[in-house]
Image: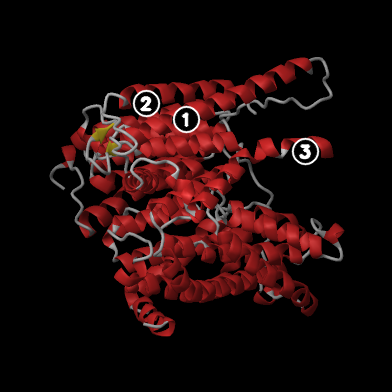
Amino acid sequence: MDIFHSLALGFSVAFVPINLLYCFIGVLLGTVVGVLPGLGAPGTMALLLPITYYVNPAGAIMLLAGIYYGCQYGGSTTAILLNIPGEAVSIVTCLDGYQMHKKGRGGAALGISAFGSFFAGTIGVVAVTFLAPTLVEWALQFGPAEYFGLAIMGVTLVSYLSSGSVTKGLMMAILGMLAATMGLDPMMGTPRFAFGSVYLTGGIDIIVLALGMFALNEVFSKIADPPGPGEVIRPPGRFLELLPNRQEWKDSIKPILRGSIIGFLVGILPGGGGVLANVSSYVVEKKVSKHPERFGTGEIAGVAGPESANNGSSAGAFIPLMTLGIPSNVQVAILLGALMLHGITPGPMFMQNRPDVFWGVIASMYIGNVMLLILNLPLIGLFTKIAYVPFYVLTPIIAFITFVSVFLVNNNPYDLLALVVIGVFSFVSKAHGFDAAPFIFGFILEPLVEFNFRQALVISKGHVSFFVSKPLPAMLLAIALIILLSPVLSRPFRSKSS
Amino acid sequence: MNKNDGAAALCGIGIGLVSLMVVLQLPFGTFRESGPAFFPTLLSLALMLVSLFLLGQYVKAKMAEKKREGKEDQKPLLASVHLGPHWMKVILAAAGLVAYAFLLRPVGFLLSTTLTTILFVRLMSPSWKLSFWISILCTIFSYAFFGWLLKNPLPKGIVYFL
C-alpha cells in the first residue's frame, strides 16, 4: 500500500462520525485546558485515560492526541492576553505577546499565533506522513541493543531537560524505573517488591501514577499555595481585531517557516518537548533579527516563531512514538500508555498490524488542525473567559475527577491509597526541585529498557561489550554519557568565560 | 541547590539500600542468565550512586556558603524550600482521600464521594453553600454517567436501594 492509499484509509477511519466527534472533543478540551493555567495537557490526558477504555482504539488516540496538540494552541491565549502561560510551552510567548497586547496589538498576536500554529501543525503532519514509512523500514533493523541504547538516551535527555538539576532529573528517572519493576518480572514472572500483597503483584497502574504525579499534585499545589488575583485585561471583542496587518504578516512569514522546521526537528528528539522547541525558535529569531533589541518589547517574530515551533514539535513527537514505540515527551508517553491499554504495541510493526489506527490518527491530525483554526479564531474571546473561573471552583472539580477516575480504573479502593502516596510524593518532590517528567518517563520506558537489556545479554552470552560493538547503540550510549557528563565537562569553559 | 537537598540525597540512598536489601532476596542470576533481581539491583545501585553525587554537590555548596558568610550582598547558594503557606491543608486533603478509600465500599459511592468533594471545596473556598452544591452536582453527574449510563458497578453501601 503506498502512502496515498494508506492516507485514504486513515481518512476513512477519521471521518467515521464518532471518531470525528472524539477528535473534536480532544481539540476543544485541549484548547480549553491550554487556556486554563494549571492542569496542563499531561494531567488532562491522564484524567481521560480511564474513559478511553470505553472508546475504540483509533478514537481513543485521536481524542488524546487532540488534547495534546490542541493544548499548544490554547496556551498562547492567556499568555498573550493575561501574561499567564496556560502551558509551560507558552512561557516564551508571554515575553512579546503580552507586550503586543499592552500596545493594543493583542488581537494580531493571537491571530498570528493561531495561523502559525495551524501552518506548523499541518507541515508537521505532512512530514510525519512521508517520513514515518521510511523510518519504519529503518526501525525494523533495530535489535535489543539498539532499543536499549535509544531508551537510555531518551531517559537521559529527559533528565537533562527537566526543570531541575540533571542530578535530580536522573534521580527521578531511576526512581521511576525502580517503581516500574514492582510487579511481575517480565522474563520469569517472579513477583518483585510485592511484599506478599496481591495488589502490589500487579504493579502500579500507569493511570494511577499519571493522575497522582500530575493532577493530584496540581490540586495539592493549589491548596498549599492558592493563586492571587491576576491582572485582568479586556480580551479582543471583534473578529477584525484578531487579524494582523500587512506589515505584521510580512514580519511573521519567515519566523513561522523557521519555527515550523525547528519545532518538528526538536519534536523528534527524545525529551524535545514544546518548551525546548519554543526556546530554540525564540533564540534563533533573536539571532537572525535585524533588531534583536526589540525582542521582549512586543516583536511579532517573538510570537510567530515560538508558537509555530511548539505546534511543529507536537507533530514531530509522533514519529518516534509510532515508528519505534519510544515517547519523546510526557504527553506522548501517556499516548503510549493509552495504546498499550488497548493492547497495541507501537513500533515498526504498528503500521502493518493496525494500519487503521496508525493512519487514522495521522489523518485525524489534519482534520484536528483545521478544527483548531476554526475554533481558535472566533472563540478566543470566549476561551479567555474560562481563565476567569475561580480556582476554588475549578480545583475541587479537578480533584473530584481525579479520585473518581482512579477508583473507576479497577473499582479498587487500594488504587486510591496508591494515588495519595504518589500525589504526596510528587507534591513534596516538586517543592524540592524534583521534576515529575523524568519519573513518568523512567516508569514507562523501564519495561523496554529491562527486556531489551536482558535479551541482549542472552544473545551476547553475557558480554556487556555487545552494546558498544555495534555502531548505533554505541553512538546512542555515547550521546547519553556525554549528556550526563556535560555539566562536569562544561565547567572549565564556564569558569574561563566567567 | 536547595537547603533540603542533603536530606533528599540521604532519602535516595536510603531507598536504594532498602530496595537492594529487598530485591537481593530473589535470585540475581548471572550476566548470561539474569534473574528477577538483576535489573532492580542495578537500578538500586545507580540510585545510590546518583544520590551520593547529589550529596557531594550539596556538601560542596554548603561549604562554599559557609565561606561566604558575612558577605550579605551576595545571593545565597542554597535556596529555601517552600511547600506553600497552607501546606497543612494538604495533609488534611490527603487524609480525606485515605478515609475515602476506606469508606467507599461500606458507605457507598454517593455519600463518600459527596463528603470528600465537600472537603476539597471547603479547603479552598469559605462558602459552605458553594461546597455543597459543587459536591452534589459532581457526584450526581458522575453517578448518572458511570453508574447508570456506562453500567459501572459503583458501590452502593448504605444507599443500597438506589
Q: Is residue A372 left or right of residue B97?
A: right
What residue sits right under mark 1 in the picture?
Answer: B47
Name the one closer to the observer, A259 or A218. A259
Which residue is depicted at the point 20% across and 37% down? B105
Mark 2 residue element? helix
Residue A269, percent from left and from top = 55, 57
Mark 3 residue element? helix
Amino acid identity at mark 2: Ser
Quadrant in which the C terminus of chain A is drawn: top right
Name the one closer to the observer, A223 or A202. A202
Amino acid identity at mark 3: Arg
Q: Mark 3 Cα within 10 Å, few/some/many (few <14, many 20+)?
A: few
Tell me the distance, in whole angstroms, between the alpha carbons under discs 3 and 1: 28 Å
Amino acid identity at mark 1: Leu
Tell me, for residue A95, which label it has, or none. Answer: none
Q: Are marks 1 and 2 on the same chain?
A: yes
What residue sits right under mark 3 in the picture?
Answer: A494
Q: Are marks 2 and 3 in contact (CB under 8 Å)?
A: no
Residue A290, percent from left and from top = 86, 66
| Residue A350 sits in quarter | bottom left
Disc 1: host chain: B
Tell me the distance, in whole angstroms, between the alpha carbons under discs 1 and 2: 10 Å
Q: Is residue B37 left or right of residue A425?
A: left
Which residue is depicted at the point 41% across and 57% down? A335
Tell me the distance, in whole angstroms, between the alpha carbons under discs 2 and 3: 38 Å
Which residue is depicted at the point 57% across and 74% down? A123
What residue sits right under mark 2 in the picture?
Answer: B19
Mark 1 residue element? helix
Q: In this view, does A481 lie to the left or right of A468?
A: right
Residue B78, percent from left and from top = 68, 25
| Residue A363 sits in quarter | bottom left
Q: Mark 2 Cα within 10 Å, few/some/many (few <14, many 20+)?
A: some
